[in-house]
Amino acid sequence: MRVISDADLRGLAADLLAAGSTVWGPARVPGSPRPGVEYRPLREAAELDLGAGLPFLPLKQVFLPPTEPLFWWERKGTEVRLVPPAPPNRRVVVIGARPCDAAGADAMDRVMGWDYRDELWFARRDAATVVTVACERPADEACFCSDVGLGPSHPRGSDLLLIPHPGGYAVEEVTAKGRELVAAFPHRFREDEQVTPGETAAAGPPRIDLAGVQRWLADHFEDETWNEVALRCHGCGACASVCPACHCFDIVDEPDSLLAGTRRRNWDSCQTSRFTVHASGHNPREGQHARVRQRVVHKFQVFPRRFGRLLCTGCGRCTRACPAGQDLFEILTLVSERALETS
Ligand code: SF4
Ligand code: SF4
């Protein structure tokens, strides 16, 4: 099997930077109040830190920045000129994505190319090669990727999947982009007959009955359970911001003057009270129970029915980030139990 050593992986990052590519990877953020790493564009290969667990913010920021201009506008007399943002013109390589994050971007591909093709998203997706590092163990007890049909070495959304073994990684070429990256830097990879694809991190058996959860969600849109689980939630939206698969954004016009301005999109969340307020003042999701229900039903029933996969990769970030201690896996366990009671 093809392998890459720790030193050569760092060397690959250095080669890519020297060739003018933008290289993202987990790195420490100097002065950050948070411990651990974040996905960042690396200035040098030495910044790459693959040993510090899951970054606080998800990989989606590479393809959908928290805020970005859609276009600039300028009025001259009766004419309005629109200036679109420049397309990404450099190769981007992510080194050290986590499998749950790569799978989140893959889920977002479905919706970004559905009834409207989001060209900004796909320009960045097309320009990027995602090199994922499989997890040797769960980051902490909040992880539940194996319960949602994925796992610590699941290849979905990756171009190359690196599976740790002593001194380096076994390399699984998942897509043509991954093969191209290997072919472009052959001196960084070598064949090792001793390493077999079987030596991968194993996914544990699922602890919840997903089919039962989906059945129960379809039949219990109005149910007291939603009031129970919403008691904890105060609608801050942190869970959506850190989620690798949540994709809602708001579009605003920011005037610079009467004659020019920027149309911009910003990450948004269905958990905030004003998200669905109509211009009339009517809010079809009045209570927090309706917003919490929306989050769970969309991720586990509506999205999979339309796109054939869950809108949750079990990364556990929403649980870690929630200031109120809401725990998505607890909610799924509760729903799974209620599904069993009513089956
Ligand atoms: S982070 Fe917690 S409190 Fe905030 S909206 Fe999400 S579940 Fe509710
Ligand atoms: S819903 Fe929570 S556990 Fe699932 S992908 Fe989003 S942040 Fe991760």
Image (cartoon, helix red, strand yellow):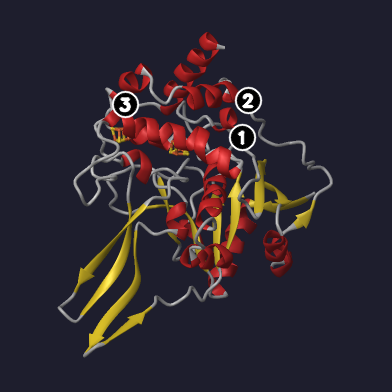
Tell me the residue that label 3 is attached to.
325
Confirm whether residue 167 shows in the render. no
Q: Evaluate if marks 3 and 2 touch, with contact meaning CB atoms under 8 Å apart.
A: no
What is the number of callouts on the image?
3
Return the residue found at the far bottom.
77
Q: Mark 1 near mark 2, Cβ–Cβ under 8 Å?
A: yes
Q: Which residue is mark 2?
A: 204
Q: Residues within 10 Å of mark 3 (few under 14, many from 20)?
A: few
Q: Is mark 3 within 8 Å of ligand 1?
A: yes
Q: Quadrant of the C terminus?
A: top right
**Residue 102, horizontal then vertical, whole percent:** 56, 48
Quote the CA–CA distance across marks 1 and 2: 8 Å
The quarter holding residue 209 reads top right
In the rendered structure, which disc, 1 or 2, sits on the residue that comes first in sequence?
A: 1
| Three-letter code for the amino acid on which mark 2 is drawn | Gly
Q: Residues within 10 Å of mark 2 (few under 14, many from 20)?
A: few
Numbered label attached to residue 151: 1
Q: Nearer the viewer, residue 63 or 223?
A: 223
Task: Provide residue 294's location: percent of width, then percent of height.
Answer: 39, 35
Direction from residue 300 to residue 77 in the image, left or right: left
Q: Which residue is located at x 42 percent, y 26 percent?
A: 221
Whole-number angstrom distance, CA of label 3 to CA of label 2: 25 Å
Disc 2 element: loop
Q: Residue at x 54, y 58 (%)?
A: 113
Mark 3 or 2 closer to N-term? Answer: 2
Report helix, strand or loop for mark 3: loop
Q: Judging from the image, what secondary structure is the residue with disc 1 in?
A: loop
Using the rendered image of the protein, determine whether residue 41 is visible from the camera's viewpoint. Answer: yes
| Residue lying at the far front of the rendered structure | 280
